Amino acid sequence: MTGSPLLLGALESPPEFEGNLAASRGLEVDIARIQPYEHNPRHAPNPEYDRIRDSIRNQGLDQPLVITQRPGATEYIVHAGGNTRLLILKKLFEETGDSRYARVPCLFRSWRRESDVLLAHLRENDLRGSLAFIDKAQAVFETQRLLAEELELEEVTQRRLETELRKAGYRISQGRISQMEYAVFRLMPLIPLALAQGMGRPQVERIRNLERAAASVWRARCSDDAAEFDDVFTVLCHRYDGPDWNTDLLRDALETEMAEAAEVSIHTIRVVLDAELAGRGLVIPEIEPEPECKTAPETPQVNNRKQSATDPEDVEEIDEYENPGTEWVPPDREPSDPHEPLDPAADPDLLSDQLDPTYAEHPEPLGDALLTDRGPSDLKSLRGRAWTLATRLAQRNGMGELVEPLPSKGLGFVLRDVPDPALAEQLDEAGLSQLSMLWWQLAACAELTYAPLESILPILPADSILRRALEAQDGDLLFKSIWTLDPGHTGYRLWWPLNDRDWRDLIHLMDTYRRIRTTAADTGIRIWE
C-alpha cells in the first residue's frame, strides 16, 4: 500500500493540519503506515476492547486518529491515545479484507519531543479513567527519564518533574509522585502480580505506611540492622503476591516475624505497630534500676529491744523490721521541702511519657520484701507511683491515653473510658481477653466502680461511655462496651500470658493500692475526700 498523496502533501506544510478536527476530517492514511506507540502507558489489555471493536464494526471509526512522525522516520505513530482503536482496525482488516478498514481518517501533529508524545498518551488514558495506578506511575517515571535526556540533565528531581508535567498539561503533586516512585521502584519488584491486577493508590499508600511503621518497630525491638528487616519484608511480599492481594495478610505475617525476633507476644507487637501507624509515638518506659531512697537506717528490733550483734543470746526470732518510711526522689531531683513529697501532677516532667519509673523492678525474686519495706509510704508519693505503673501498663497494651492522673485524692489515677473499639477489632480472642482483663485490673486499682460519683464524674470526658454508664448506674452499658470475662479465667487469660515486665508492674500496682489504703486507714484519712 502507498500513502495518501493528500496526506503526504500536507506533511510538507504541517500548520494546515494543526486546525480543528472538522478541517481535517477528509484526510485518510493507509493503516499499514501507522504504528502503535511503543511506550503506551497502558500495559494491561484495555477492558473496553470488545465494546470498541463492536462500535467500529457497526458504525465505523467515530473520530480520527491523532498521529505524528519522528524526525527521519517514514512511518507514523499514534500521538495521543487511539492505540486500541488502531489495533482493532488492523485486526478487522486482516480478518475481513474490507476496504473501509484499510484507510483511516487522521489528524496530524508536528513532532516536538518524545516526552510530549508519552504525556499525550498518558493524558488521554487518564481522561478515560481506566488506567491502572502502576501504569500511570511507570509512565511518569519514563517521562522523567526522557526529560533528563532531552534537557541534558543528570537528574530530574521530583520538584522539577512536577513543574515539567504541569507545563505539559498534566498536573500532579509531588506527594503523588512520591507515591508513584514507591510503587515503581519498591513494590514493582516485590508484588508485580498484585500491581498488574489494578492495585490502587490507597492500597499502595497503605503498604508504604505499613513498611515504614514495621521498620521502625523492628529497629526499636528486634535489630538495628536495616538489611534484616528488608529481607523479611521482601520474602513476605513475594509470598503473598497475587491477584487477590490482601495487605492484612502481610501485616499479620510481619507481626509474627517481629514477635519472634523480639521474643515478645504478638499482642505487644500489634499494639506498638498500631501506635506507629497512628503516629501516636507510643513510648513504653523501660524499667530502670531502683533509685536511691532517702531512708532512715534500718535497725532490727526484737521485742522492742535493739538487737546486739555482739550478744547472740539476746537475738530471738524477728517478727518484723521497723521502717520509719521512705520517700521516693527521682534521680537528679530534690523536693523543695525534704518533708514534702513530690507531686507528679504539679511537675510537667513527671507528666511526660518519658517520666522516670517511680517504682523499679527488683533484681531479686518478688517476695515479702516487696510487700513490706520497699518504696514510699506517704500518700502523695504512693499516688504518683500508682499513676506511673498504671500508665506504663496501659501504654504497653494500647490504652495509654486512658490513664488520667489524680494526685490529690483517690488512688492516684482514673481511667477516662473503656478501650477504643477499633483496637478491640484488631485483636484475636486471646489478645482481646488480655486487654479487657487488664482494663478491669486497672479499674479495680482505681476503684472506678466503687468511688463516689462526685469524685469521678468531673474527670471523665462528656462523651465517655464509662461516664454515661456510671451516671446512669447502667452496668449493662459498661459490660457491653468492655468484655467482662469469668473472673475465674484471670489466671490463664491474664496473669500467665503477661510478659515479665507487665506482670511485675501489675504486682507493684496492686501492692501500691494496698499501701494507699493501709496508709489512709492508719492516718484516718478518707482518700476520696
Image (spheres, rainbow, N blue to C red):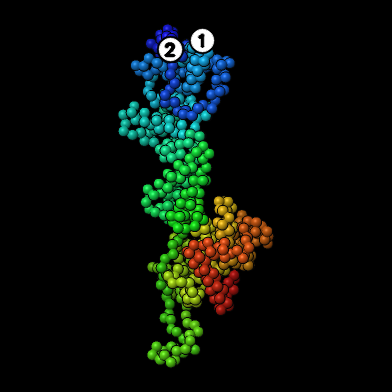
**Where's the N terminus, which quadrant?**
top left
- Name the residue rendered at 57%, 65% in the picture: 491
Q: Residues within 10 Å of mark 2 (few under 14, many from 20)?
A: few
Which residue is at the front of the view, 177 or 439?
A: 439
Across and down, in percent, residue 133 comes to 48, 34
Image quadrant where residue 335 sits:
bottom left
Disc number placed over residue 16 in the picture, else none: 2
Disc number placed over residue 472 in the picture, else none: none
Distance, label 2 to label 1, CA atoms, is 27 Å
Above or below, 168 relative to 185: above
Which residue is at the front of the view, 353 or 370?
A: 370
Mark 2 or mark 1: whose residue is earlier in sequence: 2
Q: Residues within 10 Å of mark 1 (few under 14, many from 20)?
A: few
Quick one: SS at disc 1? Answer: helix
Across and down, in percent, residue 369 comes to 47, 76
Mark 2 vs mark 1: give the one in front.
1
Above or below, 4 relative to 512: above
**Numbered disc total:** 2
Three-letter code, disc 2: Glu
Residue 529 visible in the current orientation:
yes
**Where's the C terminus, which quadrant?**
bottom right
Quick one: SS at disc 2? Answer: helix
Residue 346 visible in the current orientation:
no
Across and down, in percent, residue 357 comes to 45, 66
Three-letter code, disc 1: Ser
Residue indicated by mark 1: 99
- Name the residue rendered at 40%, 38% in the picture: 185
- Name the residue rendered at 48%, 85% in the picture: 318
Across and down, in percent, residue 490 comes to 58, 64
Single out the residue that lies furthest toward the top: 5
